[in-house]
Image: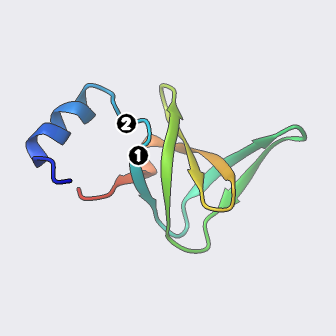
Amino acid sequence: MWIKKDFVEVLSTLGTVINMEVRIKKGTVGILENNEGQSSYIFDSTMIGKIQNENDTNYYVTFPGAFGLYIEKEDVEFIGQ
């Protein structure tokens, strides 16, 4: 299905980013959080993920292989922009 780019931009400015696909570039640092605590994860290649949640400074992005990371919003590149 095709959607007008103008319509998508309006939605993204309203904060509707959940389930949007994003690109995370090689070298970006994310935070992995599990029952053992938090640890840094540095991307060794560019990856495509999907936003599942957000807070003031981070997106929680999941990736193929069933892992998710908190990534600073400024380090996330929306696909198609």
Please state the horizontal and vertical placement of residue 46, each as a whole percent of the image: 50, 70
Determine the residue located farthest toward the right in the rendered image.
Answer: 36
Tally the marks.
2
- Residue shown at the point (9%, 42%) measured from the top left: 6
Specify the amino acid type for callout 2: Val
Comparing marks 2 and 1, which lies closer to the viewer?
Answer: 2
Provide residue 65's location: percent of width, then percent of height: 68, 61
Q: Are marks 2 and 1 in contact (CB under 8 Å)?
A: no
Residue 54 versus residue 30: which sits nearer the camera? 54
Residue at 48%, 49% (x, y): give it: 50
Residue at image point 26% right, 25% down: 14
How far apart marks 2 and 1 lie (CA) works out to: 14 Å
Dot 2 or dot 1: first in sequence order is 2
Nearest the camera: 28 or 62? 62
Q: Position of residue 18 (x, y in %)?
A: 43, 35
Indicate left or right for 69 with 22 as reference. right
Residue depicted at x 51% and y 26%: 55
Disc sitting over residue 32 in the figure: none
Q: Is residue 22 above or below residue 73?
A: below
Rendered position, 32 above or below 64: above
Label 1: how many residues lie within 10 Å, few (<14), some (14-19) or many (20+)?
few
Q: Which mark is residue 74?
A: 1
Q: Amino acid at mark 1?
A: Glu
Up-down relation of residue 69 to residue 58 (above or below): below
Q: Quadrant of residue 80?
A: bottom left
Q: Residue tagged by mark 2?
A: 17
Q: Is residue 61 left or right of residue 36?
A: left
Residue 5 appears at what percent x and percent y? 12, 48
Question: Helix or strand or loop: what does disc 1 sit on?
Answer: helix
